[in-house]
Each structure stands twice: as C-alpha cells, then as structure tokens.
C-alpha cells in the first residue's frame, strides 16, 4: 500500500515540469542561489575598489601634507637665517659662508662673459642646510637642491664640483644607491652626499664684506622661490581636500597667513639692511667696478662727491698718440671724402669721437690679457732669445697654452725637466714658433704638469677622443665578425633543403607574376639545375644525328 502511494507521487518540478532537475530552472536548479553568489562577489569587488581608492587618496594627501610641511620648514629656516644675521645672531652664519664663496668665485673668475651662474643659489642651499654652529654636515640632496634652487640636477652636480674646486666645500661622504638590507633598515633608496663648508674664521672678513649684500639678495631669491613652491603645494592639498570632502583645517589657513606676513616683514628688514650696507660700502670704498668711460662721463652724475658741474672733456693732441696706421700708406683724397660723409675725420677738438660713435668698433680684450703680459716680460728676462720677438705675440702664445697660476720660474723648470737635460737654442730663427713648439713638447705629454694648463687639457681631450674612436672601431669590427659567424651558423643549420625551398619560392613568385623578385631570388640559387620548358624539345646532347 505504501509503495503504491509512493508511485503515485508526481516527481516532476512544479515550476518547469521536467522530471529531472535542470540548471535553467530557478526552483529545481537553484539558479537563484548562483545569482545571489554573483551579486555578492560583485559587491565585494566594488567595496574593495572603493577601499583601495580611499587608501590611495589618503596616501596622496599624506604625501602632499608632508611636502607642505617640508617646504614650510625650509621657508622658516631661510627666514630665521636672514633675521638672525640682521639681529647679529649665530644662526646667520650661512650669510657669511655664502659671501665667502662669492668672494672666492670673483677672485677666480677670468672673464665676465657668459651666462649668469647658478653657483650662488646652489651654494645658498648648501649653506642654509648646514649646521649653523659649525657649517658642517650639509645634506641637501641632489634632487632637493635642484627643486629648491630652481635648476636641473646636472647644474647642481657642476656647482658642487665648482664649490669643491674653489676650496669652499669638502665632500666627506659620497652619495650612492643603498643595498636591500640598508633600504629595509633606513627606509630610503639613496644615500645623500655630505659636505663640510670652510669655517668662517679661516677666511678674510674684509675680503668677503663687500659680498654680504649679494649673499643676502641670493637668500632673498631662494626665499621667494620657496614661497612659490609652498603655494603650489598648498594648492594641491586644497584640491585634494575638496575632492575627498575632508574637513578644512582653518587653523592651518591661519598659520599660512601668519607665515606669509612674517616673511614679508623679514624681507623688508633684510632689504633695508642690504641698502644700508651697500650705501656704507659705496661711501667708504670702491665696491662697484668702474665703468670703461672717460672721467667726465662717470662723474657727471656724482653730485654727492662735490662736483656741481661735469668737468670738461679733455682730449690729447693727435701728435701725442700712436696708431698702427702711421706706418701704412695714407688714404687717398677720394677715400677721405667718402669717409667724411659717414664719420667726420676733422680735428678732435672740433668734433670729438666718443666711444658710442657708430664708425668705431671696440674690440674686447682677451681673457689672458690681464696676466700673460707680466708672464711674458718675466720670461724674456730668463730666455733672452725672446727679446727680439713681439711682446703681444709672446703673451698670446703663453695665454693660449698656460693658465693664470704659472710663473716664469715654474715654466722654465718644467720645460727643462721635460727635455731631459737637453738645452735650449740661443738664437732660434722664429722665437715665437720655437716657444710654441717648446710648450707643446712640455705640455702635450703623458706626464701632467704641476699646475693645470690649457694645452695639457686640450691634449688629454684629444687623446680621450682618439681612444674612444679606436674602441668604437674595435667594437664595430667585433660585431661584424659576430654577425658573420651567426649567418654561417644559420646557413649550416638550414642544410641541403634550403636550395630546394628557395627554388620553390622562386617558382611560386613567377607563377604569381612577380618576375623581378623571382629573378632576384633565383640569383641566390646556384646549385639548382635548369628546368626544361614545354615546347623546348630535347636537350642537345640527346638528339640523334
């Protein structure tokens, strides 16, 4: 009876009517459970993405806040340095350090030509970053120095090398990339270079005193640049705050306004001190270099020195002056008449020719003119065979091969040392040419001279270029040999079937109508025999005669 009741029960699905469960049915296949699982997984993925995005925003906000805090600390340090120097405190030592570097740079400068250097700004970052008590342990970092000074990392590297060459900074630790263990322990990838600056008491206070106002102006420029960087960083923080919907820090806004007001006050005070120092130096000493002008030109505006009127311009008589044209033929009357239309050649007392005349082009003196003539005169005393030569030519020859630090005694000793006991000629036919040959022999060798010389530097540059060219030629030859070896190995691997495959490729190209490529490809096939064409008859060797 029970078995009959069980047999009468309908086992088909009430939803789809199928006797067996079907995955497509929501009732017997439990598809609703799979849909619920898919929705749950999708919700979990969306939640994880939202969490990751939120964490990324928080990390970006933390980096922006750290950047603002770093720039704020740098602005505070610059402001403290300038205020302390104005008040006579010990934290203003960076101004004296920077003035020392400016004095050394001015003393070592051979010419005023060229673009303005970034050495003062990079050195200002070094001086402010160092310990204010001793001027040691300056760790600004190359990238950070480039950002704070407004230049590139290559410029920072060159300026650091220049500061070391001037003896103002000593590198006590070289920067390098840290190992994995050091990165894990210290939490950074690179190790910064460390510098010790030359102490202030080792220099001359009177020598660097004229450059103190310039150092203050350099620090003022760094302060303005730091304020611009700080404003950009604060704008980034405000944008992140508005995007994330965070609470605005009104206390931080107040601190920003107070910092800018304090910086403005400091700048006004320091600029007033700069003007006072500059005016005091102008009254007590000739701080600014004189212009290349006549006495009447640069005294015409100096009423404070007691000159109520400009002194009259005075000109020397033409008979007292010497000119290169006195040894040459005079101009013809026609040429004089044409020249008089553009620039009058009348008596100088009637029509004086000033330095601004359009017909007179001044020529800039070479860089070696300040020291080569003295060296030439001293050398003529030792090498009497140079007495008959022209002094400007001797000075030009020495200036093109040597540097400012050479003396006649050092040059004589070095030339005799490099010649190995051989004496000098007493009366050469061409003194300047012989002098140039002696300098080339002494400075173009493998042994470096005791003092840097331009000729030796040029020789080293040429040798390095030649060595690099030879290395490049050897590398090109080796690469050509490697390519030949690879092609030979490839052909050897191809085997005997390569000719057959090439011939088949030629035939396929000819069937497609590509005759020119087929001929070009068939030129490479040498071991495949000629194929007889239909209608050509038997070969000549098989015809019965």
Image (cartoon, rainbow, N blue to C red):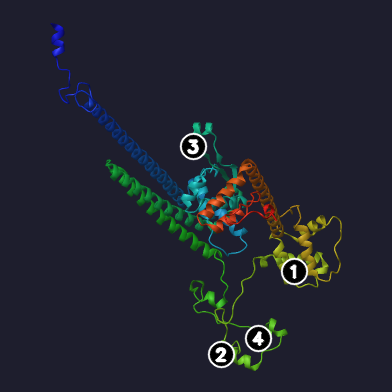
Q: Closer to the observer: label 1 or label 4?
A: 1
Answer with left or right where residue 300 lies relative to residue 426: left
Name the side, left or right, on which 70 lies relative to 542. Answer: left
What's the distance in space between the residues labelled 3 and 2, CA to CA?
75 Å
Which residue is depicted at the point 75% across and 66% down?
376
Residue annotated with mark 2: 341
27 or 399: nearer the viewer: 27
Question: Which comes sooner in the sequence, label 3 or label 4?
Answer: 3
Disc 3 or disc 4, which is closer to the eye? 3
Of tags 4 and 2, the one toward the viewer is: 2
Q: Which residue matches tag 3?
A: 188
Whole-number angstrom distance, CA of label 3 to CA of label 4: 75 Å
**Picture layout, residue 381 above or below residue 309:** above
Give the image location of residue 8, x and y in percent. 13, 13
Q: For the residue labelled by badge 1, is the local secondary structure a helix, a strand or a loop? A: helix
Depth check, mark 1 against mark 3: the one in front is: 3
Q: How far apart are marks 4 and 2 (CA)?
A: 21 Å
Dot 4 or dot 2, earlier in sequence: 4
Residue 100 in percent (x, y) is at: 57, 53
Would you say 21 lies left or right of 396 here? left
Residue behind mark 1: 394
Crowding around mark 1 (Cα neighbors within 10 Å: few <14, some 14 to 19, many 20+) is many
Q: Do the residues labelled 1 and 3 touch (CB within 8 Å)?
A: no
The disc label shown at residue 99, or none: none
Q: Which element carries disc 3, helix, strand or loop?
A: loop
Identify the mark at residue 318; answer none if there is no mark. 4
Disc 2 and disc 1 in contact, CB within 8 angstroms: no
């Amino acid at each position: 009876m029970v078995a009959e009741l069980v047999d009468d029960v309908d086992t088909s699905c009430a939803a789809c009517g199928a006797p067996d469960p079907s995955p497509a049915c929501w009732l017997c296949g439990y598809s609703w459970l799979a849909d619920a699982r898919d929705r749950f997984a999708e919700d979990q993925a969306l939640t994880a993405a939202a969490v990751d995005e939120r964490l990324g925003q928080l990390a970006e906000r933390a980096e922006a806040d750290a950047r603002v805090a770093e720039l704020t600390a740098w602005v505070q340090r610059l402001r403290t340095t300038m205020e302390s120097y104005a008040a006579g405190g010990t934290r203003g030592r960076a101004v004296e350090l920077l003035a020392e570097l400016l004095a050394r740079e001015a003393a070592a400068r051979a010419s005023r030509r060229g673009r303005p250097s970034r050495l003062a700004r990079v050195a200002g970052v070094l001086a402010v970053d160092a310990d204010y008590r001793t001027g040691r342990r300056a760790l600004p970092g190359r990238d950070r120095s480039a950002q704070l000074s407004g230049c590139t990392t290559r410029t920072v590297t060159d300026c650091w090398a220049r500061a070391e060459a001037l003896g103002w900074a000593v590198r006590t630790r070289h920067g390098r990339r840290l190992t994995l263990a050091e990165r894990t322990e210290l939490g950074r990838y690179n190790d910064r270079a460390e510098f010790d600056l030359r102490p202030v008491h080792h220099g001359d206070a009177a020598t660097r005193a004229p450059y103190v106002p310039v150092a203050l102006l350099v620090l003022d420029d760094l302060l303005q640049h730091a304020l611009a960087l700080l404003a950009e960083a604060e704008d980034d923080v405000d944008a992140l705050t508005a995007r994330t919907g965070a609470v605005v820090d009104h206390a931080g806004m107040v601190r920003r306004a107070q910092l800018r007001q304090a910086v403005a006050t400091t700048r006004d005070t320091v600029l007033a001190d700069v003007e006072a120092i500059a005016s005091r130096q102008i009254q007590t000493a000739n701080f600014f270099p004189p212009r290349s002008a006549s006495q009447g030109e640069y005294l015409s505006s100096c009423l404070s020195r007691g000159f109520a009127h400009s002194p009259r311009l005075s000109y020397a008589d033409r008979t007292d002056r010497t000119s290169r044209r006195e040894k040459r033929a005079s101009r013809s009357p026609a040429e004089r008449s044409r020249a008089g239309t553009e620039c009058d050649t009348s008596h100088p007392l009637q029509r004086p020719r000033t330095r601004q005349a359009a017909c007179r082009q001044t020529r800039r003196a070479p860089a070696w003119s300040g020291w080569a003539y003295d060296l030439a005169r001293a050398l003529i005393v030792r090498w009497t065979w140079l007495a008959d030569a022209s002094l400007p030519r001797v000075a030009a020859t020495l200036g093109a091969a040597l540097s400012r630090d050479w003396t006649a005694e050092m040059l004589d000793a070095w030339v005799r040392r490099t010649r190995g006991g051989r004496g000098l000629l007493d009366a050469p036919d061409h003194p300047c040419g012989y002098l140039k040959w002696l300098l080339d022999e002494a400075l173009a060798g493998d042994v470096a001279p005791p003092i840097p010389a331009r000729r030796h530097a040029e020789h080293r540059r040429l040798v390095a270029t030649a060595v690099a060219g030879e290395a490049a030629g050897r590398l090109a030859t080796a690469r050509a040999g490697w390519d030949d070896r690879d092609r030979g190995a490839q052909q050897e691997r191809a085997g005997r079937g390569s000719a057959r495959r090439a011939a088949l490729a030629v035939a396929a190209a000819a069937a497609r109508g590509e005759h020119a490529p087929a001929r070009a490809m068939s030129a490479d096939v040498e071991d495949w025999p000629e194929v007889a064409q239909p209608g050509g008859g038997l070969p000549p060797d098989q015809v019965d005669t």
